[in-house]
Image: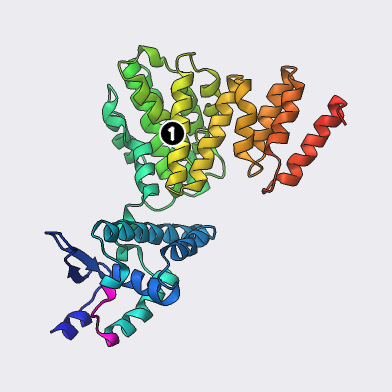
Amino acid sequence: MATRRHREIRDGNDLYREILPPDARESLKVTYWDLWMVDVLAREFDGNWDRLGDHFRAEKTGSSYRRYKAEELLNHLCLLRQALDRGALTANDILAQADPDLLLKQHRRARRKVLEMDFRDDERSPWMVHTPRREREARAMRGYWHRFPTCPGEYAAPLESLYTTSSWYSKDRSLALERRLSAFVESKEADASLAELFALYRATVTVLTEKMGLVDDSYGVVGTLCQQVFEKYTQLDRAALDMSLEILLQDLVELMIWEDYAGTHTGGPIFFAGLAAHEVPLVESILQEQWHELCDLELDYHAEKALTMLGMLYERQQMFDKFVPMARVMGTRAWQRITAMSEAAEKRGRYELALAVYEACLGPGLHEDFLRRRYHELKGRLGSD
């Protein structure tokens, strides 16, 4: 019977076995994904969880296709390890008493699924589907909408219906699409209340972002529309809206962190420069929290975006005392956020600070040589050589 059951395996989410942890009333259900993971762990990585995790992290630096798959496998690995730890179990408890022939057969499959990452989307485990990246992105796009006085969802559905195909918009078809989208926004904003404007603009940015993968926006018209709407959104009267300011700013900041098509690019500087005095510490706290959380979740790209935005907040609000500590944390991984702070200090006659920004960041990194040149150029300009 056991042999026949194993032959009926359809995918990694099939149940392999149940293990009753010590002093536990409920058994741990182990799937074939779990078996494949610990098989690779034992045979290829000497049982070292951290080494297997580092293997997936290295894969995350590759193409987007492999990066997302590695991210999914890493999440499964981490949550499996946590589940075993909670039950005072080890990987060997999963492998114990297994049929050697079965393990040999499953090892070939384990290598293909785990090491070669050869699996389809519909084969993924729940832990591979519900990754921190997907959960954070979903929250940033729509997660706070129920807190708005007028729910942006009221506008999202009709906006989505303007996309008359679910396949692909060529660059020429994007022109007609943009006209339909613009006409909709203009028709709704004409007589809208403040709460309705917040909902309309917020829904528009999300829908355009979520659908951008369907559009060849070589002409830039859809992206420009998104930027224009977001700029309007950042300049609405937040103080007059019957909504928690903390939640409104949390939603706005997370949207900027997770919007990846430059739709918030032009509005970001406007937002940070236009913050009221009482909003600045709120936004600073949100960004710092997001940066730390995203680092802990190993969402490096979006953690760096949060850090860049924190630097932009300090630069636009002329919080000069923050420049050097921020530059030290930023390093030379990116260059524009460093030059922006240095140039802001220079424009205000803070020449020592302008130099100190470079001095604080300089060290090994992708843009070290460029930033060193800019530093020496500034020293020459200031006669500090």
Q: Image quadrant of residue 192?
A: top left
User: For this view, does 3 lie left or right of residue 348?
Assistant: left
Callout 1 secondary element: helix
Q: Is residue 48 above or below residue 170?
A: below
Identify which residue, 302 or 364, lies in the foreground: 364
Give percent across and percent down for residue 316. Answer: 59, 22
**In x, y percent, where is residue 93?**
26, 71
Q: Which residues are magenta?
A: 94-101
Where residue 315 appears, x then y in whole percent? Answer: 61, 24
Magenta-span inclusion, residue 224: no
| Magenta stretch holds residue 98 | yes
Task: Report the residue that reaches farthest toward the bottom.
Answer: 101
Q: Position of residue 66 (x, y in %)?
A: 48, 62
Mark 1 neighbour density, 10 Å: few (under 14) some (14–19) many (20 or more): few
Q: Is 230 left, or right, of 107 in this rendering? A: right
Residue name at image x 32 percent, y 63 percent: 124
Tell me if residue 179 can be seen: no
The C terminus sits in image quarter:
top right
On the image, numbered disc 1 is attached to which residue? 289
Left or right for 160, reference 353: left
Judge whether 242 appears above or below 286 on screen: above
Quadrant for the N terminus in the image: bottom left
Question: Which residue shows up at 35% across the image and 42% down it?
Answer: 138
Q: Residue at x 15, y 59 (%)?
A: 24
